[in-house]
Each structure stands twice: as C-alpha cells, then as structure tokens.
Image (cartoon, grey):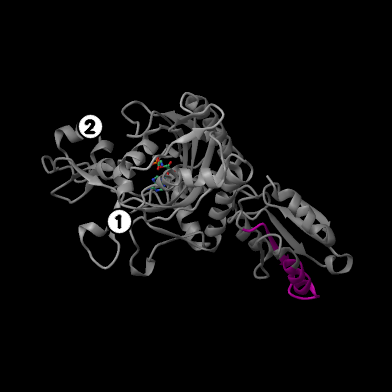
Amino acid sequence: MAGFPEVMDKLVSLCKRRGFIFQSSEIYGGTGSVWDYGPLGVELKKNIKDRWWNAMVRSRDDIEGLDAAILMHPRTWEASGHVAGFTDPLVDCKQCKARFRADKMDPKKLEANVCPNCGNKGTLTEPRLFNLMFKTFMGALEESSSVVYLRPETAQGIFVNFLNVQQSARQKVPFGIAQIGKAFRNEITPGNFIFRTREFEQMEMQFFVEPGTDMEWFEQWKALRMQWHLDLGLSPERLEFHQHTDTELAHYARAAFDVTFDFGGTLGHQEIEGVHNRGDFDLSQHQQYSGKKLEYFDQVNNKRYVPYVIETSVGADRVTLAALVNAYREETVEGESEGRVVLGLKPSIAPIKAAIFPLTKKDGQPEMARKIVDDLRGAFPVDYDETGSIGKRYRRQDEVGTPFCITVDGQSTGDQTVTVRNRDSLAQDRVDVSQLKGYLAGKLVD
Ligand code: GAP
C-alpha cells in the first residue's frame, strides 16, 4: 500500500484530470475547502448515496425517508446546543498569522507558547472560542432578528419532524427516519482534499427507541453500519471502531463509537461515521424550546414517553474519499513496459459500467459498437471510445474504475460476438451480442 500523501496527491490529480472532482470556483483562484463533483464524481457519489438509501430506507419497513430544508428556525440551534456549544478553541500566531485548533495542538507547544508553524516563542494568542456555524440573513433586513444558520448537521431536521413522520407514516417505536443532505461548517483547519470541507453531504439516520432498550439497539446499529462499509468494498483491515472517551463525547451523546478508516500515511485512521446514543437529549430540548410535546404514545402499554435516539451519521464525501483511496492501485502488466493505474471500485459504484470500443475505425465496426452503446445505455452508464490504441483505451477505463471493456473486432460483424475484458482479472470472454445485457447485469450486482 503506497503512503497516503503520495496516493492523495495522485488521486487529486487523477480526480481533476478525469472529471471526478474539481476545486470550487477554480478560475477565481478557488474557494477554500469547497469542491465540485464532475461527470464521473457525481456518478460515484450518487452510487454510494443510493447504496446507503437502499440499505437504510428501501430495504426496511421500519425506516422512513425525509428531505428537510437546510434553513431552519433559528431557535432550533439554540435548542440543539449548537449556538452555545458548537465551537472550536482557536489560537492565532501574531507573527506568521497561522491559525490552529488548540485542542489539536501538541499540548507541550501550546504550554510553551511556541508557534508550530514559524517556531517563534510567545507569539500565540490565548485560545478563543469560534462557532462553526455559517450565519446568514433571511428577508430584506440584515439585523439580528433575521439571522438564520446553514445547518451544521442534517439531524435536527429529523428531530423537529419526528411526530410528523411517525403519525403520517403510522410508524410505531422502534422506527427510524433517514435523510441525505448538505451540511455546512466553517471549519478552521479544513483540508486533505474532500476529507474535511466546509460544505459537505451527510447521510444520517435517527432510530427512535423506548428508553431502556437503547444500548441493545446501539450495538445492533454499530454492527450493521460496519457491515455496510465492508459491503461497499472497504478493506476489513483498514476499518476499525473507536470508542469515544468521556472527554471526547459530544454534548448530546451518552455513548459513541466512530467507524474509522485507515487512509494511510500521516492521516492514518480517521472517523468516517459516527454511531451515537443521543438519549432523549434532542427531543427533550425541542419540547422545551418549542413548547410542543414530542412524546410517543404507546397504545399497547398505554404509556407516553420521549423516545431515546440511536444515530448513525456518515459523510458522503468522506466515504467517497475512503472508497477512492481504498480502490487506487498501480500495477505492472506482464509483457508491457508501461504499468497501469486501476481504481478497483466495486462494479455497483463504478461511474461507468462498460466501455465499448471498435478495434478499428472501418469494416462496420464503429457502427456495430455504436449500436451496442445505444442498446446498453438504457440499462447502465456506458462509454464509447474509438481513439488511440486498444491498450491506451483500456488504461483510460482502468484508471476510472470501469469494470468491463467490450471490443468489437473483425470476427464480431460476422458472428455477432464481442470480447468482454474484466478490469481486475484481465480475462476476456467471448459473448454473443444478444446475451450482453444479461451477462453484464449479472456481474454488476455486488
Ligand atoms: N449528527 C451527528 C454529527 O454530525 P459528526 O461526527 O460531527 O456527527 C458525522 O459528523 C460525519 O459527518 C463524520 O463522521 C464525517 O463523515 C462527516 N463530516 C463531519 N464534518 C465534516 C466535514 N467538515 N467535511 C466532510 N465530512 C464531514
């Protein structure tokens, strides 16, 4: 496994060159830690989000979907604790103007007041608390009464809709609500490509349970979420659980585990998902701040209670980065001087499922290849390529993770068969054109 900085640099350049991810507003010099997904990136991330939605919502009858608005009533963030407590302690160097998070600094350097950037002594300010929420104004007046926030997590949209969903969908506790959506944090120390950004997408699910059954559900969700990452194709040896200690626990959490992924190199194991037991913190806070009851009525046992919540929260961008890092490999090819770069993504999340090449630009091969493209396009994203040598065309597809390359050759126009090359094994099967769609479909579910 190549070191992280090396792989990351290569991935950043591959992602830009091949249209996965671009820096936001690049022509203006870029926006700090904000990224745009290009034609292949949007497919990859969408496939990952679809896998999550299918696992969490479509394949279960005890979880409902939701798409809540980004802008919420400002009281939401007072109730949730974000106005008072969603802060990082900031330290500035008066000399070199570098900015650090005090909680992430080497305590010895902080104590000795030595700047980790320029090395000067006595130039660091006292830590100041900095709120991570982006503020904006609603309506025509820029005054304090019209301040609203861009949500720093999607979860609160779920909490405030707890009864709307439970009653409209006629769900009984235990049940969950899931959503995928944008979140915004004015991170002080963003970086590492799409690992920590200021605008990102979360895939969150809140599971409402009867108090007392919460730790059982917590264990179940921990196991299910770890399995989801394994099913996505992340290597088991790169995945771990990290239990939050008392000092690490967020203000709302009774217990928390992170699923961590080993990005390699200096970044190492980092959180990609959090599984939290939030107790009744959020619903109780919203009850108090809104004055509206958020209780569940258990008709069987004739009792009312505020449910506890088990939360699973994963970053769509961060898990996309984990999938890219996990998939990237460089290989030598027997009998060839040039090696190849492969994105060994699972076929189900690969942005392009098959590429179709005519071996030559004559003898009716391009026409036959185009016809195959038209036929497959309705079923999967496919690509057509007739430029360059066949070897070059294979390399182009390998580095974006296309699992199958179909070649129309001299034999094809006669007997209506094509070769299908497998990205990983390099094995080539000869397949009848009439069987192609079924052949591929069987290999794209994983
Ligand atoms: N509702 C709980 C919550 O938001 P979190 O641990 O702050 O918990 C959950 O965030 C997940 O969201 C993280 O595991 C990470 O995958 C993603 N995430 C958080 N901040 C992010 C950022 N600045 N950039 C990209 N992803 C981020």
Residue at image position (54%, 26%) is 301
> Is disc 2 placed on a helix, strand or loop?
helix
Name the residue type under label 2. Pro
Q: Residue type at mark 1?
A: Val
Q: Quadrant of ligand 1?
A: top left
Placement of 237 over or under 316, stated as above or below: above
**Quadrant for the C terminus in the image:** top right
**Residue 239 vertical position relative to residue 148 in the rendered view, above or below:** above
Looking at marks 2 and 1 on the same chain, the residue that comes earlier in the sequence is marked by 2
Whether 288 is among the magenta residues is: no
CA–CA distance in space, label 2 to label 1: 36 Å
Residue 226 sits in which quadrant? top right
Nearest to the observer: residue 359 or residue 64: 64
In the foreground, 65 or 43: 65
Asked which quadrant contains residue 430, the reply is bottom right
Q: In front: 213, or 269?
A: 213
- Give coordinates of residue 338: x percent, y percent: 60, 55
Residue where numbered disc 1 is placed: 148
Extent of the magenta region: 352-374
Task: Kindly identify the residue that appears in the image at 17 percent across and 40 percent down.
Answer: 127
Q: Residues within 10 Å of mark 1 (few under 14, many from 20)?
A: many
In depth, the one of 143 and 373 nearer the eye is 143
Q: Position of residue 380 (x, y in %)?
A: 68, 59
Tell me: 81 left or right of 398.
Answer: left
Mark 2 CB near ligand 1 (8 Å cut): no
Where is residue 177 drawn, in percent x and y?
Answer: 51, 43
Secondary structure category for the residue under label 1:
strand
Q: Is residue 180 visible?
A: yes
* Residue 285 sits above or below residue 355 on the image: above
**Residue matched to label 2:** 107
